[in-house]
Image (cartoon, helix red, strand yellow):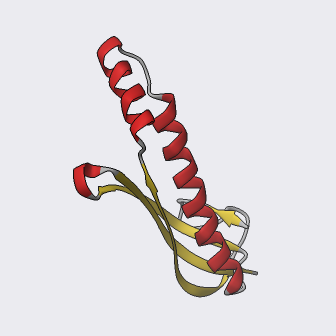
Amino acid sequence: MIVTTTNSVEGSRIGEYLGIVTGEAIIGANIVKDFLAGIRDIVGGRSGAYEKALRTAREEALRDMAHEGRARGADAIIGVDLDYEVLGTGNGMLMVTTSGTAVALE
């Protein structure tokens, strides 16, 4: 499955547009990650725990979207957009959403 932010697939022609497909992932930030991130904020540096959680959520949302595309018979998903939001009490949840257009290639 080709997944791209561009509106075409180089070297291929789009034969049919199969509709918008989406994927979502919501993960919670636990107290240990919050504590470790707080320490890094004080001493500087990157928060590996949050980066890993963000990467995991993004991969799950993309995988979910690709699964929906495959179910529609798509060869590719074009025009992919990723969005990130914080949710919940005290912004304790991270939501990643993806959307794109499923297409069949000629």
Judged left or right of residue 12, residue 58 is: left
Image location (x, y in percent) of residue 72 = 67, 87
Q: Which quadrant holds residue 16?
A: bottom right
Quarter of the image that includes the C terminus: bottom right
Instruction: Write the residue at 51% across / 67% down.
Output: 79
Quarter of the image that includes the N terminus: bottom right
Image location (x, y in percent) of residue 85 = 33, 56
Instruction: Write the residue at 44% across / 23% down.
Output: 46
Q: Residue furthest top?
A: 43
Q: Which quadrant holds residue 75?
A: bottom right
Instruction: Write the residue at 38% across / 20% down.
Output: 40
The relative height of residue 21 versus residue 55 in the rendered view (above or below) is below
Image location (x, y in percent) of residue 26 = 45, 61
Q: Which residue lies furthest to the front in this view?
A: 31
The relative height of residue 49 versus residue 13 in the rendered view (above or below) is above
The relative height of residue 73 versus residue 40 in the rendered view (above or below) is below
Q: Which residue lies furthest to the left in this view?
A: 90
